[in-house]
Structure formats: C-alpha cells, structure tokens
Image: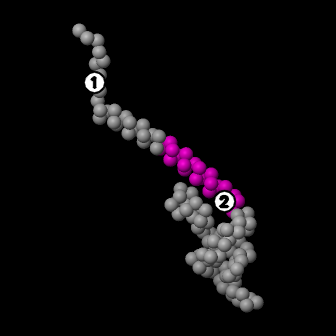
C-alpha cells in the first residue's frame, strides 16, 4: 500500500488560481496608478496660479491654441485685439499628461473653467 497524496493535480484549477492571482496584482497596481494620478491632479490644482503665470511653455501652448477655447468677448485697443476666453482645467491636464492619461480622466470628472485675457502675443491675466 503506497502512501501518496490523495489530491490529483488539476491543471484547470491551477490555471484559475494563477489568473486569480494576476487579477489581484493588476487591481493593486491599478489602485496605485489611480492614487498617483490623484496626487498629480491635486498638486496641479494647488500650483495652478503659479503654473499659469510663470510657466512660459504653458502660456505659449494656450496662446497658440486659443482659437479652440470658447471666446467670451473681443475688443480692439491701441491697434491690438484683446480677447477673453475660457479654458477648462482638463485642457491643461491634457497638455501636461496627455488626453489618454488617468490624470485627464480624473480632471474631467471635476472640471472647472478658467478665464483668461489675451492678445496675439501675451496672456495678461487669469481668473478662476
């Protein structure tokens, strides 16, 4: 009489266990990515005033794309055309992190308007 393991190897069960473990690891990783994206959005919001006024690349991007942002008012003064436009916070996040990023997805859920005054060459102010 042999003493052996009475359980037989079941490849289907083993495969299910491996898939279950991979799913759990994937969920943990996704949670980490979501938390990281959330932190980036919070930091971007808290530094928004600074970023809009002092980050030249962001201002250049806004100016070069200003026609895609809603126009509220336009006037001419001293041979310059001045405009008041609306940019959404999610547009800024898209510029920084990309349109398919988790940061962009989060920003769209809690989006808000930012008003800016500009001419062809400069942005003079932002209003939140």
Q: Which residue is mark 2?
A: 45
Q: Which residue is at a point 57% across and 64% down the rendered structure image?
A: 94
Is residue 38 a member of the stretch shown in magenta?
yes
- Relative to 26, 73 lies left or right: right
Q: Crowding at label 1, few (<14), some or many (≥20) Cα neighbours within 10 Å?
A: few
Q: How many marks?
A: 2
Write down the quadrant of residue 79 in the picture: bottom right
- Relative to 6, 101 lies left or right: right
Write down the quadrant of residue 70 in the picture: bottom right
Q: Is residue 75 above or below residue 14?
A: below
Q: Is residue 20 above or below residue 98?
A: above
First-in-chain label (1 vs 2): 1
Which quarter of the rendering shows the N terminus?
A: top left
Q: Secondary structure at mark 1?
A: loop
Q: Secondary structure at mark 2?
A: helix
Is residue 30 a member of the stretch shown in magenta?
yes
Where residue 32 sits: x, y (%)? 55, 45
Q: Which residue is mark 1?
A: 8
Q: Is residue 12 above or below residue 37?
A: above
- Residue 123, labelled with which disc? none
Identify the magenta region.
27-48
- Relative to 47, 17 lies left or right: left
Identity of the residue furthest to the bottom in this view: 79
What is the distance, in whole Å, between disc 1 and disc 2 at their CAs? 58 Å
Q: Nearer the viewer, mark 1 or mark 2?
A: 1
Q: Which residue is at a point 38% across and 39% down the rendered structure image?
A: 19
Where residue 78 sits: x, y (%)? 76, 90
């Amino acid at each position: 009489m042999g003493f052996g393991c009475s359980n037989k190897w079941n490849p289907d069960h083993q495969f299910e266990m491996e898939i279950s473990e991979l799913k759990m690891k994937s969920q943990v990783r996704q949670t980490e990515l979501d938390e990281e994206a959330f932190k980036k959005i919070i930091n971007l919001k808290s530094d928004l005033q600074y970023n809009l006024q002092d980050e030249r690349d962001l201002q250049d991007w806004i100016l070069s794309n200003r026609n895609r942002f809603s126009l509220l008012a336009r006037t001419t003064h001293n041979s310059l055309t001045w405009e008041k436009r609306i940019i959404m916070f999610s547009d800024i996040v898209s510029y920084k992190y990309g349109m398919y990023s988790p940061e962009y997805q989060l920003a769209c859920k809690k989006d808000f308007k930012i008003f800016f005054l500009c001419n062809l060459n400069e942005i003079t102010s932002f209003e939140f």
